[in-house]
Image: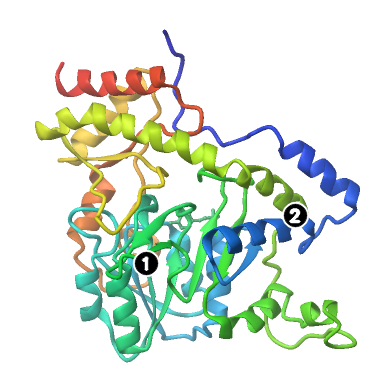
Amino acid sequence: MTVGKIPFNKPLVNGSEIAFIQECLKSGSLSAGGDFAEKCTHFFESSFDFKKCMLTSSCTDALEMAALLLNIQPGDEIITCAYTYVSTANAFVLRGANIIFADSSADNPCIDTAEIEKLISPKTKVIVPVHYAGMACNMDEIMALATKYNLWVVEDAAQCIDAFYKGKNLLKRPLGGIGHLSAFSFHETKNITCGEGGMLVINDENLIARAEILLEKGTNRKMFLRNEVDHYEWTEIGSSFSASNITAAFLYAQLLELKKVQKHRISAWEKYYSMLEPLAQKGAFQLAHIPEYASNNAHIFYLVCDKEKTRNELIKHLREHKIDAAFHYFSLHKSSFYANRNLSIPNLPNSDKYTSCLIRLPLFYGITDAEIETVVSAIYSFFQP
Ligand SMILES: *Cc1c(COP(=O)(O)O)cnc(C)c1O
C-alpha cells in the first residue's frame, strides 16, 4: 500500500461535533456554564475522580487562574522545568513571580525531582511539574517536598488526559488529580480537542469558592445563580476565563470517544516502539523511558538523538520522504525573554539535550499501520543507508 504525505498531526474530528453544536444552538444556551459544559465537567469528575473541574478557554487560562487563585505576588518564586511550553512559566510571571528553573531528568524530559529541594527558598510558593508526553513526574517526591516546605503544587497536565500515576502505595491515580490544582489543554494538538480549550482542576476544596469568583470576572454570579444572594456584584479580581457552551458541545462529542481514541493511539505508539527498538538497541537514538510509576497515554512518540546535527538531519531526511516530524520546546531558560531580564542563566544540560536532540514522530487518531511502517522504514534508511 502506498501512502501520501504523512502529517505530524491530524486534529481529532469524530463526526458528532456538529450534531452536538446544533443541539447547543437549539437550546439557546451559548455562553459559559451551559448543559454541555456541565456534561464535560461531570465526565471528568466522575471518570477521573477530580474534586472540581472548570472549563476554560485554554490551558494557558487555567494556569493563569491558578496563579491568581494562589495569590502569587511579585517576588514569589515558582519552581518548574525549563523544558516546557511558555504558558507554564508565563502564567506566574504575569503576577510578578520569578521562575526558578530545574533541569529535566537524564532519562526523560520531566523535572528531575532530585534538583527541586536545592532550589527551594523562603520565597518559593509553588512547584509546577509538567508531565511531558503525558508521562508522570515523580509525584510522591514532589508532594512530599510540598508538605515539608508548605508549598502549593500545580500540575501542568496539558498533555495528560487518561494518564495515570502509580505511587508508593500502589494506588493508581489520574494525573491532574494529585496536585492542589492542575491544568489540562484541549488544543488541537492534544489527544482530545475542541480547537482551543482547557480545564482547571481544583483538588483542594478550600480553593473552590474563590475559583468560581475568578472565573466569573471577579463577581459572585455563581452564588446568585444558586439563589444564595439576591444580586451579584464585583467582589474580587477575576477575568473571563470560561469556555462557551458551544466549545463544550464540541468537546463532549470527543470525550464520548475517549476510550476508542486512546486504544488506537496506544496501539500506534506501541507499534512505533517495537519496530524502532532494534535500532535503539544499536545506539542510533534513545526511545522514551517510561518510569515504573507512569502510564503511557500515547500523547507523543519521541526519540532522543545523540547530537543536534543528527536530529536536524533526520527531520530533513523525513521531510524528503514526505513525513512531517517535529522538534519540540526551546528551553525557557535560553529564551530571549529570559535573557532580556538579566537573570543568571542556570546550567541545565538535560533541558539543553532535549531542546537540541528530541524529535517527535507523526502520531494522531487514524494513523494507519502503513503510515507507521513508512515512517519507520524512512528512519531505518537514515541510520542504515
Ligand atoms: C499545550 C500545552 C500548554 C498550552 O495549552 P493551551 O490550551 O494551548 O493554552 C501548556 N503546557 C503544556 C505542557 C502543553 O503541552
Q: Foreground: 146 or 126?
A: 146
Q: Foreground: 144 or 65?
A: 144
Q: Residue under circle 1?
A: 129
Vertical position of residue 310 compared to residue 357: above or below: above
Q: Is residue 343 visible?
A: no
Q: From the top left corner, tell me how far across and down residue 312 is, in percent.
A: 26, 34
Q: Which mark is residue 151?
A: none
- Tell which residue pokes out farthest to the front in this image: 170
Residue at 23% x, 79% y is 117
Q: From the top left corner, tell me how far across and down residue 165 is, in percent.
A: 36, 61
Residue at 89% x, 51% y is 27
Residue at 59% x, 64% y is 45
Vertical position of residue 378 compared to residue 212: above or below: above
Q: Secondary structure at mark 1?
A: loop
- How packed is label 2: few (under 14 Cα within 10 Å), some, or many (20 or more)? many
Q: Amino acid at mark 2?
A: Phe
Q: Secondary structure at mark 2?
A: helix
- How packed is label 1: few (under 14 Cα within 10 Å), some, or many (20 or more)? many
Q: Foreground: 304 or 223?
A: 223
Residue at 69% x, 86% y is 236
Q: From the top left corner, tell me how far across and down residue 47 is, in percent.
A: 56, 58
N-term-proximal mark, 2 vs 1: 2
Screen quadrant of the C terminus: top left
**Quadrant hosting residue 382:** top left
Q: Residue under circle 2?
A: 36
- Tell which residue pokes out farthest to the top in this image: 1
